[in-house]
Image (spheres, rainbow, N blue to C red):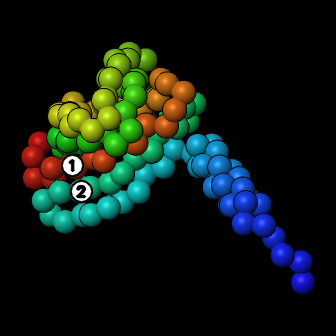
Amino acid sequence: MKKFPLRRIALAVLMFLAVGMVRSENSQTQRFPQFDNEDVKVWKSVVMPNSPLTMHRHDHPRVIIALRGGTMKIVTQDGKSEEHVWETGKAYWLPANAPNTQHADVNAGDQAIEVMVVELEKEQ
């Protein structure tokens, strides 16, 4: 049986991990449910560049905690937009959406934005 030098094995493992990181950077925008009860709904959103969230709305106010910050463009159904710069490690307040409105979240950068969202279910 042929022996493999430790350096060669370590290099192979590092290459495998690097390929895995590149693949994760190419994944699609996703929402990962974390916790849900009658008071709060918590999810993690990963918003990739060029992969916006579809039009949606929030009936309740929420706190956004930036796990990996960036610039998010919020585009409403009438085409208007506003930019939010979220710094990694900071928390932000977002009010409930106005009645009969929807928006899409568009990552305006070139790296994934990751946020934890805590939506207050009993607030309007």
What is the three-letter code of the residue carrying label 1? Glu
Do the residues under discs 2 and 1 have CB atoms within 8 angstroms? yes
Give 83 or 67, whichever is nearer the viewer.
67
In this rendering, the count of numbered labels is 2
| Residue plotted at (34% across, 43% down) | 67
Give 106 or 49, whichever is nearer the viewer.
49
Is any atom of residue 118 visible in this view?
yes
Q: Which mark, by number, is residue 41? A: 2
| Residue plotted at (20% across, 42% down) | 62
Query: Image quadrant for the N terminus?
Result: bottom right
Q: Position of residue 72 (x, y in %)?
A: 39, 27
Q: Position of residue 32 (x, y in %)?
A: 41, 57
61 w.r.t. 35: above or below: above
| Residue plotted at (21% across, 37% down) | 91
Question: Extreme bottom residue here?
Answer: 1
The quadrant where residue 40 appears: bottom left
Give 39 or 24, whichever is nearer the viewer.
24
Q: Which mark, by number, is residue 119? A: 1
The quadrant where residue 94 appears: top left
| Residue plotted at (31% across, 29% down) | 86
The quadrant where residue 114 appears: top left
83 w.r.t. 89: above or below: above
The local crowd at label 1, few if under 14, some if 14 to 19, many if 20 or more residues have their Cα within 10 Å, is many
Q: Position of residue 93 (x, y in %)?
A: 17, 34
Earlier residue among tags 2 and 1: 2
What is the three-letter code of the residue carrying label 2? Lys
Give 45 or 10, whichever is nearer the viewer.
10
On the rendered structure, is 54 left or right of 93? right
Is any atom of residue 96 visible in this view?
no
Q: Which mark, by number, is residue 61? A: none
24 w.r.t. 86: above or below: below
On the rendered structure, is 122 left or right of 75? left
